[in-house]
Image (tube, rainbow, N blue to C red):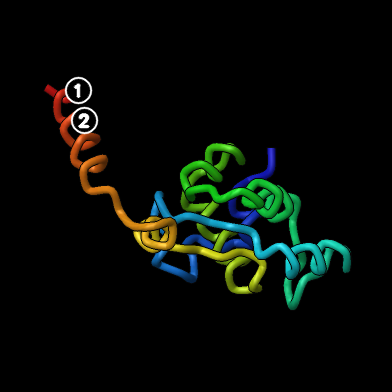
Amino acid sequence: MVRPYTITRGRTAPERDDLTLITVLTTAEAEADAALARGSRAGARGLQPEHRLILDRCRRPAAVAEVAAGLDLPVSVTKILLGDLVAQGLLKARAPLSVARAAGGVDLGLLTAVREGLRRLST
């Protein structure tokens, strides 16, 4: 097993503080394909196997929590890796509401129904 501090090169906090569990991530296809074609180096930092897995997983939009679960890594470690890829322009991060607006708007009725359902589950 590789220790998390090895994967993150000793970093303990992400450079970005805007990545939440529900931030939606999408691979920047052209840039990622070019970086993967160049080999193990992308910009100043090399792509680790976990970076490659993230790029593959995010070819379809995925939340930070989904990516962390898929990698079987702590969320804090995953956020550091995601921040690397966003900084290199290989991954796009969007707040969930901006994604909903782009898809035609937020369905407040659906959100209300989900909230009420969660309330019923917790009582």
Instruction: Say if 101 sits above or below 50 in the image.
Output: below
What whole-number distance in Å separates the C-alpha atoms at marks 2 and 1?
Answer: 5 Å
Q: Report the residue that reaches farthest toward the front.
A: 104
Crowd class of label 2 (few under 14; some 14 to 19; many from 20; radius 10 Å) = few
Tell me the SS state at disc 1.
helix
The amino acid beneath tag 2 is Leu
Which quadrant: the N terminus? top right
Instruction: Say if 119 sits above or below 33 in the image.
Output: above
The amino acid beneath tag 1 is Leu
Tell me the SS state at disc 2.
helix
Viewer-side residue, 79 vs 100: 100
Crowd class of label 1 (few under 14; some 14 to 19; many from 20; radius 10 Å) = few
Q: Which residue is mark 1?
A: 121
How far across and down, in percent of the image, does residue 27 sit? Answer: 64, 59
Viewer-side residue, 17 vs 113: 113
Q: Are marks 2 and 1 in contact (CB under 8 Å)?
A: yes
Which quadrant: the C terminus? top left
How far across and down, in percent of the image, does residue 32 sit? Answer: 74, 64
Instruction: Say if 83 sits above or below 120 in the image.
Output: below
How far across and down, in percent of the image, does residue 6 sit? Answer: 66, 54
Determine whether, in the image, residue 118 is placed left or right of residue 69.
Answer: left
Determine whether, in the image, residue 10 is placed left or right of residue 32.
Answer: left
Asked which quadrant contains residue 116, the reply is top left
